[in-house]
Amino acid sequence: MAGGGFGAASGGGDFEAKITPLVIISCIMAASGGLMFGYDVGISGGVTSMPHFQKKFFPVVYKKTQEPGLESNYCKYDNQGLQLFTSSLYLAALMSTFVASYTTRSLGRKLTMFIAGIFFIIGTVFNAAAINLLMLIIGRILLGCGVGFANQAVPLFLSEIAPTRIRGALNILFQLNITIGILFANLINYGTNKLTGGYGWRVSLGLAGIPAGLLTLGSLIVVDTPNSLIERGKLEEGKAVLKRIRGVDNVDPEFLEIVEASRVAKEVKNPFQNLLKRRNRPQLVIAVMMQVFQQFTGINAVMFYAPVLFQTLGFKSDASLYSAVITGAVNVLSTVVSIYFVDKAGRRMLLLEAGVQMFLSQMVVAVVMGLKVQDNTNNLTQGMAILVVIMVCSFVASFAWSWGPLGWLIPSETFPLEARSAGQSVAVSINMLFTFVIAQAFLSMLCHMKFGIFLFFSAWVLVMTIFAMFLIPETKGVPIEEMTERVWKQHWFWKRFMDDFEDDPKGKAHV
């Protein structure tokens, strides 16, 4: 799904470290930021397909869905206000990422997570108590600010607290929590949709208070990361924390490496300018393209609007929420698959296999919809409907073990330290921008392109698979600080960007 663990991993050898209870507790707590994000994503699609909610806030849509034949099957939900409800969150997240990038550096990871929690709580209150569209949108915007802050701080926190040997798995933990959040949201919508009295949507939106509370409470309990303390000049405190989280007394090698990395990072006056240097270009191109491609697989379109999509196919409201629960569960399980395979089969293998699988699944959906779902008639047989659900699941599964987690993992492990935080901000904001574009456009595209929308996305899947084949190098098992030597300088295309003298006039003089 959208979002997911972007970590600033520390390189170097494996330092002495036990997996201490403090690390486990800190990670469980921080990862609740992922739950929150997933819950917000999953809840909106289900809530927008609830009749009481439509009746109150989007009477126009309500009218279209209630009267058969009034409007084309594909166009019932084509409404800019409805799309704004979903996508305002991403726009706010996009804006707040840049502020969060600053607070993460200057105030620390811990405080940034606390700020995110507060945003989440206030946003939830606005949403659950909404009496008009404005309150609803303000609530979504506040939640979006929370997402921006959480997505910047949590993954950095996870990667800096985690011992090197389990860093990859902890990085994907954030992504896993997002998928669990989505699944929970789907289950809750399934339940609240059955409530009589028409306040089910308030319960759905209000329950976001639980992960919000967890994150806020947790951020008060955990320690700040040693990297963050040292970065802000608190060396002694940083060393003390390092001893506590590693559970050993001899932390000098790791401590000195963090101090050194922080010194190098401080020398970079303008991180965003540094990002544009020629030697950082391959990483930047890959980071940006992976975010764009991640959205153009069509995954968010399928996830946000799964209930709406299944209703378009003619499943009843209840059945469509039910199918959304199934896709949610597939999402969670497949993310677990990626945790297992990412360091064994490697990144490229997962991307290429999933490319083929996503392409075929989408083509089948497009063909079935093209033949069976016309504008005003819908003769989808039981068997065909099940086939569509299976294909959507196959698509979701292959996404969840490839572009989902890897869209975040690869950018976070390829940037050199001094460009990492800025690279992260760029990746998050590009992701949010394209999530916003797709969320805002999807229902209109479904209306105008009909089943062609799946052909549109499958064409993109073809493009990204070719991109992965030729331009994404394998990075499994390579220590972060050795990426340049072992990956970029060996790559048939990217090595031309790695000529050392280009950024260093003194170098040219020596020659």
Image (cartoon, grey):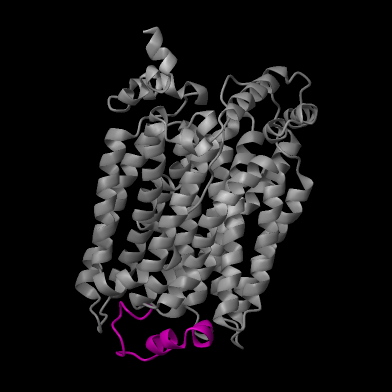
Check residue 55 for magenta coloring.
Answer: yes
Question: Position of 125 compared to 358: left or right?
Answer: right
Question: Position of 504 compared to 154: left or right?
Answer: left
- Residue at 45% x, 77% y: name it: 81
* Tag count: 0
Q: Position of residue 29 (x, y in %)?
A: 69, 48
Q: Which of 126 and 376 is in front in this view?
A: 126
Check residue 390 for magenta coloring.
Answer: no
Res. 449 image quadrant: bottom left
- Residue at 60% x, 40% y: name it: 156
- Residue at 60% x, 82% y: name it: 195
Residue 25 in sight: yes
Image quadrant containing the C terminus: top left
Say if 375 sits above or below 334 in the image: below
Task: Return the residue found at the far left.
Answer: 371
Res. 146 image quadrant: bottom right
Res. 452 image quadrant: bottom left
Residue 36 in sight: no
Report the magenta residues as a range.
53-77
Q: Which of 402 and 372 is in front in this view?
A: 402
Q: Where is residue 269 in the image (x, y as percent from the top left)?
A: 56, 32
Q: Nearer the viewer, residue 382 or 124?
A: 124
Question: Position of 88 compared to 153: left or right?
Answer: left
Say if 384 sits above or below 79 in the image: above
Say if 35 sits above or below 167 in the image: below
Task: Return the residue found at the far top.
Answer: 510
Q: Position of residue 263 (x, y in %)?
A: 63, 24
Q: Position of residue 71 (x, y in %)?
A: 30, 86
